[in-house]
Amino acid sequence: MTDILLIQPPVRDFYLTSKRTIPYGLTCIASSAQKAGFSVEIFDGLATSKSHKLQIPEEMAYLNEYYGKEDISPFALFNSFKHFGYSFEHIGKQAAKTGAFLVGISSLFTPYAEYALMTAEAVKAYHPGCKIVFGGHHPTTLYNEVMKNTAVDFIIRGEGEESLPLLAAAIKENKSPDSVPGIVYRKQDGNLYADNPALIDDLDKQPLPAISLLKHNFYKRGKMASAVVSASRGCPMKCSYCSIGGLPYQKYRQRSVESVIKELDINISGHKAAFIDFEDENLSLDKKWFTALLCELKSRFAGSELELRAMNGLLPISLDEEMVCLMKESGFKTLNLSLGSSSSEQLKRFKRPDVRKAFDKILLIAEKYNLKTVGYIIAGAPHQTPKDSVSDLLYLAERRVLAGVSIFYPSPGSADFEQCKNLAILPEKYSLMRSSAFPLSHTTGRKQAVTILRLGRILNFMKSLIDSGYEIPEPGPFAEEEIKDGNRTETGIKLLKWFLFDGKIRGVNKEGGVYEHSICDKTAGLFTEKINKAGLKGC
């Protein structure tokens, strides 16, 4: 029998990046519960290759215009809405088998909140005697909404490492949980008791994550075992779209270099992890600390096949040549750089520093040290125009960098979420607050946002042609023909030739039939008008 079961729920979406689904937070909570003397299991509802197609939900029916046809071309977006992971029924049955008296369910992201609730309902159906506690960003911010579901007994707001063992002890001893930091529960009169979010002051006092509880064979990048590490929490910046810096309780804290290295050593030596992603919001912000970490990484793991990444993005103004050189020597092969936008007005709206000069400087340094780069921009935010987003793409076109286009979504707890609420442009359902659903229709409409995302694919294809030694094709009129027996690159070259001529973005089905995607012609025209005049560079 197990005391505590921690569950990462399955999700439903158009795509899933499996290497970014490692339930790191659950391993941190599990280790604290084990230290307190409880037996713990983790069930990752996503740790399976199983998926099956579903009908696009009714509230997303408008997406059929953009995703309704299959596309095997390099310009494809999505086609099928899928359930990724185990079934809710299977998870409920597995929970019952453990006999756990406390089941913790992670609910990190608002658009996936309903799947966490469906998981709770399945667990209660098969294991009615257990108590269920929710944790994660969504219930921390919107606890009133979550507690409307009677399958949820408790919520721990904020950081749960210290709180969950205290809650487990209170349940086991039949005591009131009101002294548990961050706790939310229903009082006898039906009203909610809700504490302020819990915060851990000294991260080094926490035991290292219980990664031995994970299904390591599943988390791979290609053939390499992968892992994630968080060397800090919080963020001192106040970007309008981000809920981390916007939360008053979530102050910025760093772990000691020694603690981070110990955790990395367990992953690398013990579990043969060869790809490590730092999940920090701002890994390189403290130069002295980051330099010390890189020097220790270089010393400890020199000569290994280790690849390091910071996929949440690095702030260009926090980097310099010394740091980039050390990153290269430590195992970084790619720099994920956060640009935000090339528009000074949009940067002001985002409450972000203007990093363009630093961005260009770091791109040159990265090229010197043979590091790949990705530059991230946000499109479709409140008051952001399609013209500015196309300008961002053209800005990236002229630089040796892969274009990372992120479609804006409103995150509860962020300043932009409140702005969207005040503008009455929030989607009607939480499930729509995801990039793949193009959640807003404001100064950038949905069709324009779809077009911008496809233009990003086209731009990166053009960059890949340059890097592979191909010539960018001359614009030419569309020929009524099927595309058969051509490889993906040859197919893309044909489609690109026609696009540069008439601004139509086309797709190709499995039979070789060519068709036009639904796009905003004006937005595509802004791109085709200038892309040939831009000093296009590869990656």
Image (cartoon, rainbow, N blue to C red):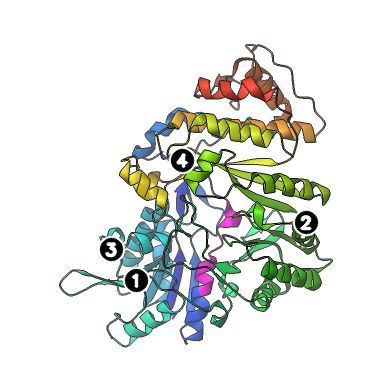
Question: Residue at the left extreme?
Answer: 189
User: Where residue 327 appears, x then y in whole percent?
Assistant: 75, 60
Say if the magenta span includes residue 529: no
The amino acid marked with disc number 4 is Ala
Q: Earlier in the sequence, mark 3 or mark 4?
A: 3
The amino acid marked with disc number 2 is Glu
Quadrant of the frame with the C terminus = top right
- Magenta span covers which residues? 17-28
Q: Earlier in the sequence, mark 3 or mark 2?
A: 3
Residue matched to label 3: 147
User: Where residue 81 appears, x then y in whole percent?
Assistant: 46, 41
Q: How far apart in space, not on screen, are marks 4 and 2 (Cα)?
A: 33 Å
Q: How far apart in space, not on screen, are marks 1 and 2 (Cα)?
A: 42 Å
Q: How far apart in space, not on screen, are marks 3 and 2 (Cα)?
A: 50 Å
Residue matched to label 2: 321
- Magenta region, main secondary structure: helix
Give the foreground label among 1 and 2: 2
Circles 1 and 3: CB atoms closer than 8 Å: no
Q: Secondary structure at mark 3?
A: loop
Using the rendered image of the protein, determine whether residue 392 is visible from the camera's viewpoint. Answer: yes
Q: Residues within 10 Å of mark 1 (few under 14, many from 20)?
A: some
Q: Earlier in the sequence, mark 1 or mark 3?
A: 3
Residue matched to label 1: 196
